[in-house]
Image: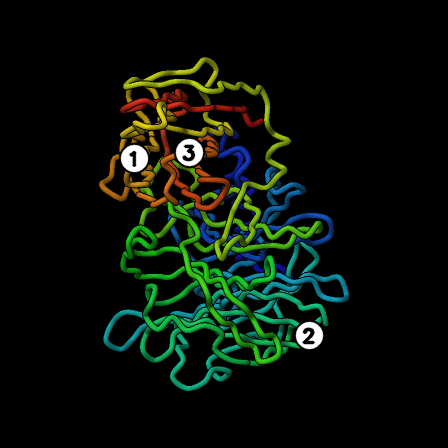
Amino acid sequence: MTSQTLREARKYEEASEKMIKKEERPDFHLSVRTGWMNDPNGFSYYKGHYHMFYQYYPYDTKWGPMHWGHAVSKDLLHWEYLPAALAPDEAYDRDGCFSGSAVELPDGRQLLMYTGVVSTPRWNGGHCETQTQCIAVGDGVDYEKYDCNPVLDGKDLPQGFSREDFRDPKMWKDADGKYWCVIGNRPADGSGQILLFSSEDAFRWKYEKVLVENQNRVGKMWECPDFFELDDKWVLLTSPQDMLPKDFEFHNGNGTLCLIGEYDSQTLTFTERNQQSIDYGIDFYAPQTVMTPDGRRVMIGWMQNWDTCMPHSPYQKWFGQMSLPRELSVKNGRLYQKPIKELEDMRKNKVAYPDVVLENDTIHLEKVQGRKIDMEISIRPGDPESGYRKFAVRFAQNEEYQTSLSFRPYESVLKIDRKFSGSRRALIHQRRCKVNSREKELKLRIILDRFSVEVFINDGEQVMSATFFTDMAADGISFFADGKVRMDVVKYDLD
Ligand code: FRU
């Protein structure tokens, strides 16, 4: 039975979606149907479609009581909205249906597990939240909340583990048909930890152990975990809150963390070997992965971040978009990301400029422009002996606006700067990323989709993502060198 709250949300989204023109949204990135979007949820392949649910407040472009929005796609680039899947309409989730995941049951139904939130006023002011894990089962469009919800609550946790910060279940099914789940939590010291649970039927869950402890190493609470095998390693993704910066690897505030190591599935022991950020740009958080039918591990993140959300004008009709789907791999203990190969089918109008020499100058290249593009640039010193001081590429550019990437080879630092993108707020506009020393050659693949840029550095060794809300009339691209640079540029429109 669909509740009144869900029926209202479905009616509202259908009507207000019509007020948003296609050109006012990203083209091949999933954006919110109407209102506000945060984390990807329930990312899955089910009955011939990819399903993406998301943290959703349809009624405003700000965060509010969380619903689950829903969209489906055949190729992860062209999305179709379905009616909202969940609304906060039960006593155990009345203040929000927070993040979660999806698995397919043996009988062909899809099971969603999400965090139900109840907020109660404290006697001395403020609120106290209780977070529990809840289930809904459905057919890919309509989902029924389970009668025995919540399926995991404070009673299932060891003493001292937080009941307030207990959220974001990510499930998977192993080769023997057993279900597993990782959930974010805090131990008594207020740091973060990832808990492991198991189930025979995906309905009755059992606490197993602490899979990973933060011990105040990277931020505090760890949100939105994901855990999977990849290239003979195991990868744990999570999004830490309240981080302190560490060199160029981690920045202040909310960020992303990838731990790579080994997992002993007998003793349920994860041995960490390497750690890194997932994305080195400004806007990326809470990613989730799916396994494609042909065996690729694909990740999508919320292409925003709590600390850097651009305040938006009351006239804006939507806020929140997802990142590109990225194929993951592990090489030499590092996570590599590249845009899913389906994006290449959208490439049109190739233009190529091999070996362009650029010396103390700014240039434009004919037909190299646009706001929906896929552009590969490789940059080398003009004279191998002398090197160069700085290279920059500017895009979404006209007389008034621009966003830029600049590289100083002597520091090996690539900087993204959206200060001149049209923002009227003093929030974070720049971020630096230390790339593997590339005095010989730096390779960038830059993808623009109207209001965002994603930069895949050196074949996906690092990625930087950022959004900007620049007037669409700014579609120029220019290249600048301080010193002498040689570059190859290949550019496609994406359509
Ligand atoms: C992460 C997060 C999750 C939570 C959701 C609420 O962005 O804080 O931990 O489930 O957002 O919308």
Q: Earlier in the sequence, mark 2 or mark 1?
A: 2
The label shown at residue 408 is: 1
Q: Are marks 2 and 1 in contact (CB under 8 Å)?
A: no
Q: By what rule are the colours in the image chosen?
A: rainbow
Instruction: Specify few, some or many for label 3: CA neighbours under 10 Å numbering under 14, 14-19, or 20 or more.
Output: some
Mark 2 burial class by Cα count in 10 Å: few <14, some 14-19, many 20+: few
How many marks the image carries: the answer is 3
Outermost top residue? 366
Give residue 378's position: percent from left, percent from top: 45, 29
Residue identified by numbered label 2: 201
Determine the residue positioned at 52% across, 19% down: 352
Residue 171 rendering spot, x and y as whole percentages: 59, 66
- Residue 21 location (% of width, % of height): 50, 30
Q: Earlier in the sequence, mark 3 or mark 2?
A: 2
Q: Which of the two discs, 2 and 1, sits closer to the camera?
A: 1
Per the image, label 1 sits on a secondary structure element best described as strand
Q: Tell me the element at label 3.
A: loop
Q: Quadrant of the N terminus?
A: bottom right
Of the two numbered discs 1 and 3 on the same chain, state the one appearing first in sequence: 1
Residue 379 figure quarter: top left
Type of amino acid under label 3: Glu
Name the quadrant where ligand 1 sits: bottom left
243 shown above or below 299 = below
Q: Amino acid at mark 2?
A: Asp
Q: Residue furthest front?
A: 385
For this rendering, which residue is in front, 365 or 485?
Answer: 485
Farthest right residue? 107
User: Between marks 2 and 1, how big is the CA–CA gap?
Assistant: 54 Å
Q: Is mark 1 within 8 Å of ligand 1?
A: no
Reading the image, the residue beneath label 3 is: 441
